[in-house]
Amino acid sequence: MAERRPTDPAGRGHPGPVAGIVAALAGRVPAGPVGGDPVDLAGPAGGDLADLAGGDPVSLAVRAGESPLQPGTGLLPLPVELESRSGPGAPASYPADVAIDPALGPEAYQLTTDADRPRIVAGDAAGAFYARLTLSQLPVGPDGRLPALRVADRPRFGWRGVLLDVARHFLGTDDVLAFLDDLADLKLNRLHLHLTDDQGWRLQIDSWPRLAEVGGRSGSQGSAGGWYSKDDFRRIVAHAADRHIVVVPEVDFPGHTNAALVAYPELACPGVVPEPYEGDEVGFSTLDTANELVYRFTAEVLREVAELSPGPWLHLGGDECLSTPDEGYAEYVRRAARLVTGLGRIPVGWHEIGQAGGLPDGVVGQYWNYTIPEDGHAARVRSLVAQGGKVILSPSDVAYFDMKYTADDLLGQDWAEGPTSLREAYGWEPTTVIDGLAETDLLGVEAAVFTEYLCGLDAVRSLAFPRLAAFAELAWSPAPAPGQQRDFAGFTRRLAGYARRWDARGVSYRRVPEVDWEA
């Protein structure tokens, strides 16, 4: 994974406060969801609207010769409907008029630029925010006007998430805030923070203070570690909320718990003496699921995490518990899930939790195996659905962006069926992964960036981007028509234009050969 920036010696995250809310989503999109502030719309003019669309399988109405846009204009993700209108476009310097119409639905919007000013009608504040992002991607002509367009847009999936692993290599608060800006600019709306693992514990817990004070000192590859104070975490949650992103905290239980056990050895199984760990093996640690103290610990940790996290979901982990007895694992998962529902939240776990019966209705399972599931994995997912649950798809062979791009890369891993190319990240179809699941069973999709070998934000970004842009379009834009595939060539043309936004913000990304970056 990536190289880390040094944290302060106390390991408490950011070095100091951020002055105001970052408004540099490359198009200078205001953080506020609604309002009339101008949007700085910098971009080239000229070209053909058909090149903007790239021929992707969406509803597209184009009147030839009208509202020209330059080939490679960086419109990502591609809207559901994009129609050229006659006449001049609105002046780019004029603020947009915004109205809310809940009948459009969550996160949906309509944008027109063929009047005296841009006009937005959105289903909610999030939809208005996304409309402004689309507006910021449109080019401005030599006359200072936008192309005359009508855009009608809505996301395919309500859950468009990214997991960021801060447990292996810690990322300071300011780095997480910057990454949130990256996600918001692609209309992604969930940040799954992997806060705990064998290598480190990254969140202050007052009822069990040694979790951060001791468990937070270590990290992968001998890194110094670190943790978030409660105020740090509140800043992350608030920054995310301003960008219509929900933070989903994960405390990974009952396995992946070595750092917690170093802090509190009494939670370990009899005879186990935990030591700090900085390697990459999994499955060797477990809470003692036969010890009632473990359930008091779990309840108190979850309570404090819930108090910091206003979103509806708490992620319990539950993966790769190779050292936990099967009966103890099932009992722990059931009890922990009930603790979450008792806090008024929805429990989320990795799809292995499907092997436990008696889960609460509405539980969410996150699938991490491959697009062609290995033995037993699909059955666990179907068990979750049969118990009234929903599914988030994160197939590791196409959506784990800590994987290498090519076999020759030095940075990244290759355990998930080898490297993952940009084309592979773009080309998979969620509804074909698990036989027997309907699209209505899917809460959404989520990419992941684990950091066993990624030290610092630049390294995280260089593996995440541009693949995360491909994922964002897959999560937002409509599915291809039956028998068709997504238009990768059209996507790469738009991606080359979009990359100017990364350049403007100093975001690291891999200039993969599938894209003509100079086009």
Image (spheres, grey):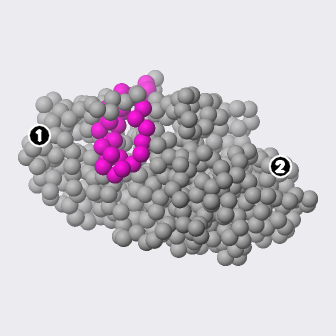
- The residue sitting at 58% across, 57% down in the picture is 170
Q: Position of residue 131 (x, y in %)?
A: 30, 53
Report the predominant secondary structure element of the magenta stretch: helix
Q: Tell me the crowding category of disc 1: few under 14, some 14 to 19, or many 20 or more residues within 10 angstroms, Cα based.
A: some
Would you place residue 389 above or below residue 266 in this image?
Answer: above
Mark 2 in CB contact with mark 1 (< 8 angstroms): no
**Quarter of the rendering occupied by the N terminus:** top right
Element carrying mark 2: loop
**Residue 210 versus residue 5: which sits nearer the camera?**
5
Q: Is residue 323 visible?
A: yes
Q: Secondary structure at mark 1?
A: loop
Q: Which residues are magenta?
A: 484-512
Look at 77% across and 63% down and name the residue there. 262
Give the amino acid type for the residue marked by disc 1 in the picture.
Ser
Q: Quadrant of residue 337?
A: bottom right
Between marks 2 and 1, how big is the CA–CA gap? 66 Å
The residue to which callout 1 is attached is 86
Outermost residue, right side:
271
- Quadrant of the frame with the C terminus: top left
